[in-house]
Image (cartoon, helix red, strand yellow):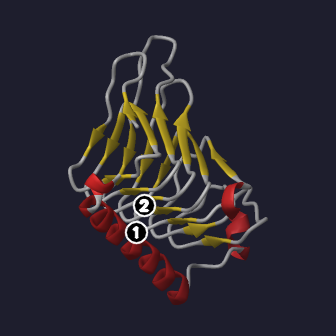
Amino acid sequence: MIRRNPRGDWPTIAETAFIDPTAIICGLVIIEEDVFVGPYAVIRADETDENGGLQPIRIGGATNIQDGVVIHSRSGEAVTIGRRTSIAHRSIIHGPCTIGDDVLCWLQLGRVQLHDWRRLGDTSQFSEGCYLPAGFHVPSTTTVHSDSDLANIPQVTIDMTTFSEHVARTNVGHAHDYRKLRNDF
């Protein structure tokens, strides 16, 4: 369902994106080319700041928002998700936050919530919320409190990068394939 928010903002969705009919896209949401939004995802930009202002939720090109993902932000603040990024099943992204390009966001199938992030670097992979620079993989149950903790965090391996690229390619393919079936829904 594509709908406006109470302020009157409608989503902007690229023609080459695919939005599953069960997903809800509401308000000041910008979805770029070749994005796949899976079943029961909710992307909602409708909460304004004290002055009625609202920053967009922006989903970069060739990104996939998988089944049951929820993306929202408090007090009209921005959420930006980069290009070729995968937000895995049932993840919850609650901004303000910025997630870079080529990120695999695998959040233990709904057990973890990203909240008030400043930035997740490009080509990162993670399974727990934290701040980290590009190229790191944060294993489940790991917490980074300071830069010195990064010495114990592994960098993304070639195998992880290959897996992330496979997930991204597969879901861009979904966007193309499901668009062809659009009239079947």
Tag 1 residue? 171
Give the residue drawn at x 58%, y 72%: 136
> Tag 1: Cα neighbours inside 10 Å, few (<14), some, or many (≥20)?
many
Give the residue drawn at x 73%, y 66%: 149
Give the residue drawn at x 54%, y 24%: 75
- 111 on left or right of 9: right
Q: Earlier in the sequence, mark 2 or mark 1?
A: 2
- Which residue type carries mark 1? Asn
Q: CA distance from mark 2 to mark 1?
A: 6 Å
Of helix, strand and loop, which one carries label 1? Answer: helix
**Is disc 2 in contact with disc 1, using a CB cutoff of under 8 Å?**
yes
Query: Residue extending furthest left?
Result: 15
Task: Between residue 150 and residue 63, name the one nearer to us.
Answer: 63
> Tag 2: Cα neighbours inside 10 Å, few (<14), some, or many (≥20)?
many
Q: Is residue 58 above or below residue 46?
A: below
Query: Residue extending furthest bottom?
Result: 159
Tag 2 residue? 64
Q: Quadrant of residue 28?
A: top left
Q: Quadrant of residue 5?
A: top left
Q: Which numbered circle lies on residue 106? A: none
Task: Tell me where residue 151 appears, x and y as whole percent.
Answer: 69, 74
- 26 on left or right of 72: left
Query: Residue extending furthest front?
Result: 184
Q: Is residue 98 above or below residue 160?
A: above
Q: Is residue 32 above or below residue 53?
A: below
Give the residue drawn at x 50%, y 59%: 66
- Which residue type carries mark 2? Asn
Task: Between residue 92 and residue 138, name the one nearer to us.
Answer: 92
Of helix, strand and loop, which one carries label 2? Answer: strand
Task: Tell me where residue 157 appears, x and y as whole percent.
Answer: 55, 85
